[in-house]
Amino acid sequence: MKDLDEREERKDALKGLGCSRKRVEDARFTQGKGNYIDDVNLPGMLHGDFVRSPYAHARVVSIDTSAAMALDGVVAVLTAKDLEPLGLHWMPTLAGDKQMVLADGKVLFQGQEVAFVVAKDRYIAADAVELVEVEYEDLPVLVNPFEALKSDVVLREDIKDEKEGAHGARKHHNHIFTWEEGDKEATEQAIGAAEVVAEEMVYYHRTHPCPLEPCGSVASMDKVNGKLTLWGTFQAPHVVRTVASLLSGIEEHNIRVISPDIGGGFGNKVGVYPGYVCSIVASIVTGVPVKWIEDRMDNLMATAFARDYWMKGRISATKEGKITGLDVHVTADHGAFDACADPTKFPAGFFHIVTGSYDIPVAHVAVDGVYTNKAPGGVAYRCSFRVTEAAYCIERMIEVLAIELGMDAAELRRINFIKKDQFPYQSALGWEYDSGDYHTAWDKALKAVDYEGLRKEQAQMLEDFKAGKSRKLLGIGLTHFTEIVGAGPVKNCDILGMGMFDSCEIRIHPTGSAIARLGTISQGQGHATTFAQILASEIGLPADSITIEEGDTDTAPYGLGTYGSRSTPVAGAATAMAGRKIRAKAQMIAAYLLEVHDDDVEWDVDRFAVKGAPERFKTMKDIAYAAYNQAIPGVEPGLEAVSYYDPPNMTYPFGAYICVMEIDVDTGEHKIRQFYALDDCGTRINPMVIDGQVHGGVTEALAIAMGQEIAYDEMGNCKTGTLMDFFLPTAVEVPNYQTDHTVTPSPHHPIGAKGVGESPNVGGVPAFSNAVHDAFRPFGLRQSHMPHDHWRIWKIAQTLGLHD
Ligand code: CDP
C-alpha cells in the first residue's frame, strides 16, 4: 500500500496524462506579454495596405497611382502589372486552382485586393489607399450558385475554355468540379424500394472563423545574406515556407518562417493570402521589412469564408425506423477562386463522414463546386474539412426522418447507432471508424438531462400554448456526432503534395529538463501545456521541466501544422513516439549504471529499476546526467530523439450534445435553459483544457447556429463585414455549459487519444438548430435554414400561423 501511494505521489508530481495542469501559456497572455504578429517591429519597417474592390464583379479599366505616390511617406504602390514580370500576379491555391494576388483585368468579389500601398506608417498607407484611382466597369453579378451554373456570365475568363479542372471534368464555365463517393446504384435501389423516405434541402450558410486577431505578416529580406524571414499568423508555417520558396525561387534553407503567438485561427490562417505575397515582394523591392496587418473588415470580407453548402439529402428507412440508405447531393459555393483548404484528393474535404454515427448499409454522395462573386477560400472553421457540414446534414436528416416516421428522434438514433462490437467499422462511404461506444454515451446523456422528464414538460408547455395560457415553446435539440480528425495518413492526405505526417524532436538537457519542438502551432489550444504532459508520462520528467516550442521553421522539425484537430492525433502521437525512443536509450544507460543486462531493468513512472529489486533504480534525471558525463560503451553521448509520425488512420471522436431551449413565439427570442455536452476523445490528456475547448467550441457553434453569417445582397455587397453586423456572442448570450465524457481510446494512437478541439463546433451547431426545429415540430416545421436569429425564428412562427 505504501509503495502504491509513493508511486502515485511520483506520478502526480509529473503532472502527466489526465492531470488538469494549469495552462503555462496563460501567465504571459494574461500579463500582456504575448508576442503577436503586430508586436513584431523592426528597424526601418514599412507598412502595407490594400486598395480593395468596391464591386463584386467588374472590369478594371485603369489604375492611377500617381496621387498616392505623391503623398509624403509613400514608398511604392504595387499593381498586378508590377507583379506580372515576377510571375506573382496570380498564385496557386491549396485546392489546385489559381487566384489573383492583385486584380488582373477584373475583380471577382467585393473586397478583392487591387493594389498594395507601401508607406512609412500604417496611417499614411491608409490615406494613400484612398488616393489610388481605379476605374471600374461593372459586370453582372452572380451570388447564387444554382443560378451561376445556368448563367451565360463567365466569372473566370482565365479558364473559360478549360474542360478539366484540378478535380476532373467541368460541366459549365462556372463549374469547378464534381466529386463523388459511394455506390450510387445500390443507394438508388435502397431508396426506391424503401417503406419510408425523407427528403430535404439542408443549407449550411456561409460564415467566417473571425479570430480575435486578424491575419498579418512581416517580411524581412536580408539582401546581403540572401535570407528571407517571414513572421506571420500561419497555422502551417513549414508549408508556408515551402510555398514561399516555390513562388519566390529563394531556396528553402534561406527562408525562415516564424509563427509567433497567434490570437485564434480556427482555419482562417491556413490559407495563403495576397497580403503575404505582397509583403514579401515589397520587402524584396524596398530592401527593408514590410508589415501587413488586416483590419476587421478586411478579415471578414476577404479572407477565407467557411461553409456555404447546399445539401440535398434523401434518407430511407423501414417502417420501424431502421435506416436503409442515404444519398446527398451538395452544391458548394466556393466563391471567386477555389481556394478551399482540403487535402488534395478531397475537394469536398471529409464530407463523406455524412453517414455520421449510424450503421447505414448503402450511401452515395456527390458534390458540385461552383464559382460565384464571393470571397474565396472555404476553410474548416473549427471542424476537420467539411465535417461540420456533414454532421449538420445527417443530424437534420435524422430529425426529418423521425418526423416522417412519427418517431422519437432519440429512439431513432439509438436503433441506428453503429454498435460497440462493430468497431473497427467500415462506413458505406469508405471510412474505417477506429473505435466507439455510442449507446453508452447516448444513454448517459439522456439520463443526465432527464430526457423523459423534458419531453413531459415540453408536452405540458405545448398544451399551455394551445390553451392560450403561455406563448412559450420548448425545444429539445438532440445530436450524436462522429468526428474524423487527425489527417494523414500520408498515403491518403497531402497539402500541395506534402504528406500529412507530423513531428516532434526532443532534447533532454544534462540536468534532467527538456525541450521538445513540434511541427504544429498552437493558436490558443494550450499545446505548451498538454504536449509537455504527454512527454512527462512517457519519459518521467515533470511537465514543469519541459519546454514546448512550435512555429519556427529554423528550429522545429517539418510538420503540416495545426488545423482539423490534428495536433493530438498526429503530433501528439509523434511526441509519444519520440519519448519512447528517449526511453529506449535511457534503458541502456540505466542498465549500464546499475550493472545489469538491459532486459533486467523495468520502467516505473520516472525511473528504471532492477526487476525484483525496486530499491535499485536510476531516475530519468540521473540517466540524463549520465548521458552527458559518462562514457558508456556502445552508446552515443547525449539524449535526443526525433519522430516523424504517419498515422495509420484518422481518429473518430464522438459526442452526445443536448440543448434545451425555450422560444418566445411572439418575439422569436430564445433562452438556452441547458446545454449538455458529452465528449469522447479517447484518452484525455488534460481535462481542464478539454473543458476549455468545449466551452469555446460550443460558443462558436451557438454563434453560427443562432446568428452569425456572411451575407451578400444581389449586387454582391457583403452585408456583414463589420462586428456591428457579424454576430459574435458575448457573456450575455452564452449559457452555462454542462460538460461530461466517456473514454473510448483510439486503438492505433500510441496513447489512445483522439482530437477534441473541433468536436464542440461539429456537435454544437446541430444541437442548437435541432432545438429550434424541435420546438416547432408539432406545428409541422421540417426544415428552416440557419442562422436562427430572432427575426428568422419569429418568421417561422409567422409562417406556421402561430401569430395572431
Ligand atoms: O489540433 P488542435 O490543437 O486544434 O486540436 P486537438 O488536437 O484536439 O487539441 C486541442 C487541445 O486539447 C490540445 O491542447 C490537446 O492537447 C488537448 N487534448 C487533450 O487534452 N486530450 C485529448 N484527448 C485531445 C486533446
Image (spheres, helix red, strand yellow):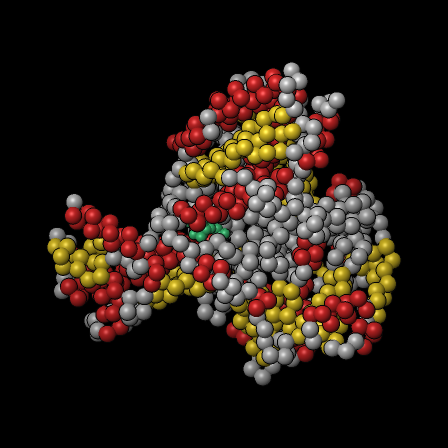
User: How many marks do you count on the picture?
Assistant: 0
Picture coordinates of residue 411 (x, y %)?
Answer: 50, 23
Observer-nearest residue: 539 or 167? Answer: 539
457 lies left or right of 612? right
Quadrant where the C terminus is found in the figure: top right
Q: Is residue 72 above or below residue 355?
A: below
402 lies left or right of 753? right
For the question of whether residue 503 can be seen, the reply is: no
Observer-nearest residue: 90 or 42? Answer: 42
The residue sitting at 51% across, 24% down in the picture is: 454
The residue sitting at 65% across, 34% down in the picture is: 669
Corner quadrant of residue 70? bottom right
The residue sitting at 26% across, 67% down in the picture is: 624
Picture coordinates of residue 191 (x, y %)?
Answer: 61, 25
Observer-nearest residue: 56 or 477? Answer: 477
Q: Is residue 291 above or below residue 733?
A: below
643 lies left or right of 296? left
Picture coordinates of residue 485 (x, y %)?
Answer: 49, 46
Picture coordinates of residue 59 (x, y %)?
Answer: 84, 59
For the question of whether residue 594 can be seen, the reply is: yes
